[in-house]
Amino acid sequence: MVTAAQKLRSVSIADYLADEIAANEKHEYLGGYVYAKAGGRVAHNRITTNITVALGSALQGSPCQPYNSDMKVRVQLPSHTRFYYPDVSVVCDSNPPDDTFQDQPVVIVEVLSRDTRRIDETEKKEAYLTIPSLQAYLLVEQDSSKVTVHRRTEQGFHAEAYEGLAGFIPLSGIGIDLAIGNIYNGVKFESEPTSENQSE
């Protein structure tokens, strides 16, 4: 997740990818500029782990594979290239094994926080939704049981909100339903919403 971290320096894509292999911390790349990626709270890491485990279990035997936040996604915009580290992604048509990034994610997940919400809901959303392979972009709250899904339709992407712990999120692009209860397993909230799935 990009934060308000200081801009480090302008670099080429080749130099960024080479430097990132040896770096002690992760950096995201936006058109020649490199930004440090902030770490997450305990709740954030629990949620991302829960999602990765749930997807991995559901996708056993499938050509699709979930990746955690160690895997970059390349976004090739008309004017420049970006590399982000999504919290979770699912890829069905993988890049070569030696690549350090993926080009064709089918599902991307970002877990929201106060520091990253604006970027996840605007900059990253706008970039991710340009990826031709992407079928669903999930924005997951960490302080309440709510997931907003930007889902590809014939008319473009449509946002749906899922609240509460009892429901499922259909992910037809990878052929599974993701249980919201599995996303928030072991996560404690001050209060729980009671409404069910609803379209925005």
Image (spheres, helix red, strand yellow):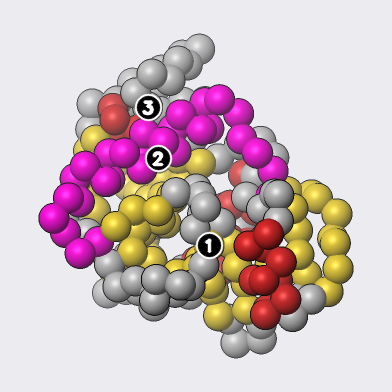
| Residue type marked 3 | Tyr
- Secondary structure state at the residue bearing disc 1: strand
Q: Position of residue 130 (x, y in %)?
A: 48, 75
Residue 102: quadrant of the picture: bottom left
Q: Residue furthest top?
A: 190
User: Is 48 positioned to the left or the right of 106 in the image?
Assistant: right
Residue 71 versus residue 197 in the image, above or below: below
Task: Look at 46% across and 29% down and name the residue there.
Answer: 46
Question: Do we see residue 70 in this rendering?
Answer: yes
Work out whether 188 lies above or below 123.
above
Verify whether residue 50 appears in magenta.
Answer: yes
Task: Point out the stretch of residues depicted in magenta.
Answer: 37-64
Instruction: Give the mark nearest the N terminus, 3 or 1.
Output: 1
How far apart in space, not on screen, are marks 1 and 2 (Cα)? 22 Å
Q: CA distance from mark 3 to mark 1?
A: 24 Å
Q: CA distance from mark 3 to mark 2?
A: 11 Å
